[in-house]
Amino acid sequence: MKQLSLSKTRSGFANAKPLRIIELQKSYGRFVAIQEVSFQIAPGQLVTLLGPSGCGKTTIMRLIAGLEIPDAGEIWLGPSRLDKLPIERRNVGLVFQNYALFPHRTVAANIAYGLHCRGIAKADVRKRVLRTLDLVRLAQIEEKYPRQLSGGQQQRVALARAIVIEPDVLLLDEPLSALDANLRIAMREEICALQRELGITTVFVTHDQDEALAISDTVVVMNEGTVEQVGTPVDLYDRPGTEFVAHFLGRANILPAVVEESADGELLLRLGESVVVRTSSNDVYSCGVQISIAVRQHRLSLFAAETGCDGVNGVRIPGRVLEIQFLGSQVHYAVETALGVLRVIHP
């Protein structure tokens, strides 16, 4: 993909650096915020820290930025031990959840702030600010103040201020949470496109599963201060490693099953008294072992009992509809069955 350059002396961010987090720990008094967190980001990748409120994802971001000091563990950016450097020596771009724009400064002055702090010559500051304004499509409003901007424009200013310094790593702390639903989608697409073009190693923090699936090269799913699973969006969605991941990353029915057969990458499973399912699996189990399986709600189909349908792949589960929710493009059903209440999504 084409690389964009913010300065004439640097060929874009083609020399992006990998980021490694090694057994990171942080506590606040008796409260353990994160414990033994490890993952790595390839150069130029966008990695999302995904999890519910209080799971530790923002703590990790603050540790990378230098706003907090870890109790244990290491943070490496390329060959440099980042956690040993003071905050002013970490070349990190940061977009806060509330944007943190200076209300008394114009758009251009907000963007230029980091460059002035680094002692960049005024002429070079102006050139870099203009190029960055063009990148984020704000060239026509550089003299306006934050109070005169829409939410989307404020978000672009915060992003521009973070990338104008040509950071080695870009940190985005739930940058879309203050926007309405339609604008969130538009802005996440813009952020994704800009990150791909510039090739900046990026950490994106969110609790929104759709955001994580849409923009990420890799997703780190967190829960109660620990990493539940790391993988691509497709891997995590299709092959969740824990019940938490299956529930949190998309909707799933979790069902107990007993292994009847396990051979050649296939499992024959018994659910309840009469439902037998054959499925593929890379895992090998002993016969008679009880496991849990995740069935995505949109992969179940509903048929009226009188149609005599044989079901999908020969699997048919009688049930009674308890609840219907119409959500425009989808209809959500709750169905009472011998296996418990199953949730079904129909287009």
Image (cartoon, rainbow, N blue to C red):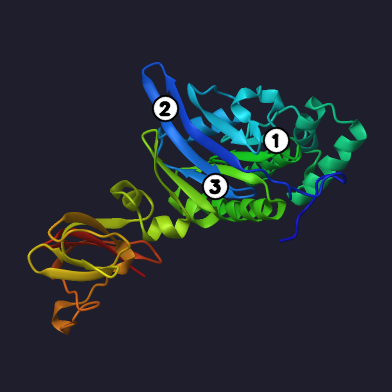
Q: Pick the residue in front: 335 or 311.
A: 311
Helix, strand or loop for disc 3: strand
* Residue ID for mark 1: 146
Q: Is residue 29 above or below residue 152?
A: above
Q: Are marks 1 and 3 in contact (CB under 8 Å)?
A: no
* Residue at the far left in the pictured view: 273
The disc, 2 or 1, on the residue closer to the chain's N-terminal end is: 2
Determine which of the numbered discs, if any, sits on residue 33 in the image: 2
Please give the name of the residue rendered at 14% of the width and 82% of the height, measured from the top-left corner: 306
Q: Nearer the viewer, mark 2 or mark 1?
A: 2
The disc, 2 or 3, on the residue closer to the chain's N-terminal end is: 2
**Location of residue 329 in the rendering, given as x and y in whole percent from the top left corner:** 41, 67
**Quarter of the rendering occupied by the C terminus:** bottom left
Say few, some or many: other residues with alpha carbon within 10 Å of mark 3 (under 14 / 14 to 19 / 20 or more): many
* Residue ID for mark 3: 47
The total number of labels drawn is 3
**Left or right: where 142 falls relative to 40:** right
**Label 1 vs label 3: CA separation?**
29 Å
Say few, some or many: other residues with alpha carbon within 10 Å of mark 1 (under 14 / 14 to 19 / 20 or more): some
Q: Amino acid at mark 1?
A: Pro
* Residue at the far right in the pictured view: 123
Please give the name of the residue rendered at 45% of the width and 47% of the height, measured from the top-left corner: 208
Q: Pick the residue in front: 25 or 250.
A: 25
Q: Taking the image as drawn, is residue 106 in sight?
A: yes
Q: Pick the residue in front: 174 or 120.
A: 120
Q: Is residue 274 above or below residue 65?
A: below
Q: Amino acid at mark 2?
A: Ala
Q: Taking the image as drawn, is residue 62 in sight?
A: no
Please give the name of the residue rendered at 62% of the width and 23% of the height, measured from the top-left corner: 84
**Location of residue 138 in the rendering, given as x and y in whole percent from the top left corner:** 76, 47
Helix, strand or loop for disc 2: strand
